Image (cartoon, helix red, strand yellow):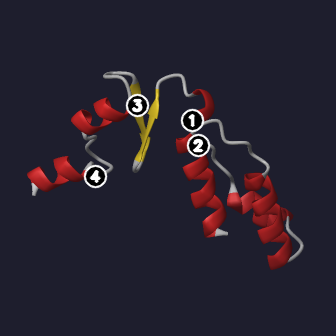
C-alpha cells in the first residue's frame, strides 16, 4: 500500500521525484490535496473562490452559475497549470 501511495502522489504524501521533474528540485510546495505549486506562485498561485458567498449573493441558480463562471472565466491564465485549474473550476459550474 505504501508503495502505491508514493507512486500515485496521494494528497498526504508528495511524490518528490515526480514533482522534481515538473518543478525545480525543492522549489515547490504541497498546498492542498492534489496541488503542488512552485514556490512564490506567480501565475500558478492557487485561486480560491468562496462558493458560499457567491450563493448568498445570488438571486437564483442561474445567477449563481453566471456569477461563478464570470469570476472564473475573467481570470487570464499565466501558465498551463493555472489554465488547467481554471478549466476544472469552470467545468464544475
Q: Earlier in the sequence, mark 4 or mark 1?
A: 4
Q: Residue at x 58, y 43 (%)?
A: 82
* Relative image position of residue 41 (x, y in whole percent): 55, 28
Q: Earlier in the sequence, mark 1 or mark 2?
A: 1
For label 4, the residue is 10
Classify mark 2: helix, strand or loop: helix
- Determine the image quadrant of residue 47: top right
Marks 1 and 2: CB-CB under 8 Å?
yes
User: Compared with residue 55, is residue 47 higher up or lower down, i.e. above or below?
Assistant: above
For label 1, the residue is 44
- Determine the image quadrant of residue 56: bottom right
Marks 3 and 1: CB-CB under 8 Å?
no
Q: Nearer the viewer, residue 69 or 13?
A: 69
Marks 4 and 3: CB-CB under 8 Å?
no
Report whether 59 appears left or right of 40: right
* Relative image position of residue 67 (x, y in whole percent): 82, 62
Amino acid at each position: 500500500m505504501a508503495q502505491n501511495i508514493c507512486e500515485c502522489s496521494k494528497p498526504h504524501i508528495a511524490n518528490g521525484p515526480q514533482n522534481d521533474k515538473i518543478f525545480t528540485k525543492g522549489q515547490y510546495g504541497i498546498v492542498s490535496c492534489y496541488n503542488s505549486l512552485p514556490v512564490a506562485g506567480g501565475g500558478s498561485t492557487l485561486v480560491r473562490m468562496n462558493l458560499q458567498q457567491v450563493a448568498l449573493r445570488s438571486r437564483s441558480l442561474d445567477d449563481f452559475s453566471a456569477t461563478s463562471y464570470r469570476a472564473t472565466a475573467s481570470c487570464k491564465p499565466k501558465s498551463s497549470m493555472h489554465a488547467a485549474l481554471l478549466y476544472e473550476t469552470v467545468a464544475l459550474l
